Image: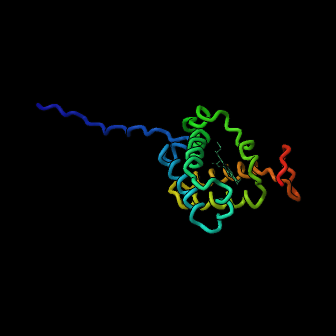
């Protein structure tokens, strides 16, 4: 008499929970894609020409720094601090006069990037919100209705 062996279907292999924005974006490659697309748009699209002109002619180093910073900011490995120290992002932007116009141009370039780089819609919304808050916080130019913290005087 042959014995029947019950074959139970294998339990689904547990999938890692991709919880951080870094993982959901696709890790290091995803962050690179985002950063490269952002600066490619800045280089190419005429509506970002003023924003582009604030940056160094060669954007390689800027791209690298934003990549290193975003890696940690999005919940991945902190690559920026070991090389450059505490980000102190607002302070590092003091040499550049950032008002509402500059903030809005930066954000428009980032929103276009978020819309054109592949990611899920929830992540897209979350990143939009997080970047908007950070870009607003970066303003340092005294304008009517905006007297930012710090003693920054731009001529
Ligand atoms: C709000 C409008 C913004 C403007 C006009 C602006 C402009 C600039 C400029 C001109 C530089 C110098 C580039 C260089 O020296 O290579 C810079 C550096 C940088 N920006 Fe922004 N930025 C803005 C917002 C942001 C935001 C929201 C983030 C992050 C979410 C960010 C992240 C960085 C980083 C990581 C660097 C490199 C800092 C360093 O180590 O020198 N910026 N930005």
- Residue lying at 54% horizontally and 61% vertically, measured from the top left: 116
Q: Residue at x 71, y 43 (%)?
A: 92
59 lies above or below 16: below
Residue 93, image x, y percentages: 72, 47
Give the left or right position of residue 135, taking residue 84 as reference.
right
Instruction: Name the spot of residue 67 as percent of width and height, x first.
Output: 56, 45
Q: Position of residue 30 (x, y in %)?
A: 50, 49
How many marks overall? 0
- In the image, farthest residue toward the left: 1
Q: Is residue 28 left or right of residue 81?
A: left
Residue at the limit of the structure toward the bottom, as seen here: 46
Q: Could you tell me residue 142's position as x and y percent?
A: 85, 54
| The N terminus: image quadrant | top left
**Residue 68 figure quarter:** top right
Is the C terminus in the top left, top right, bottom left or bottom right quadrant? bottom right
103 horizontally vs 121: left or right: right
Left or right of 66: which side holds 4? left
Scheme of image coloration: rainbow
What residue is shown at x 60% (from left), y 60% (from top)? 42
């Amino acid at each position: 008499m042959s014995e029947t062996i019950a074959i139970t279907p294998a339990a689904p292999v547990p999938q890692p929970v991709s919880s951080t924005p870094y993982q959901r974006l696709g890790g290091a490659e995803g962050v690179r894609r985002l950063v490269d697309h952002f600066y490619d748009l800045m280089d190419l699209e005429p509506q970002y020409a003023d924003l582009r002109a604030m940056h160094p002619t060669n954007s390689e180093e800027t791209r690298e720094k934003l990549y290193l910073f975003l890696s940690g900011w999005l919940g991945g490995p902190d690559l920026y601090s070991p090389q450059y120290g505490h980000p102190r992002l607002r302070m590092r932007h003091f040499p550049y006069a950032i008002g509402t116009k500059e903030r809005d141009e930066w954000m428009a370039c980032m929103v276009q990037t978020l819309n054109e780089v592949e990611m899920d819609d929830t992540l897209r919304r979350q990143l939009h919100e997080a970047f908007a808050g950070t870009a607003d916080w970066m303003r340092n130019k005294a304008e009517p209705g905006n007297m930012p913290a710090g003693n920054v005087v731009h001529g």
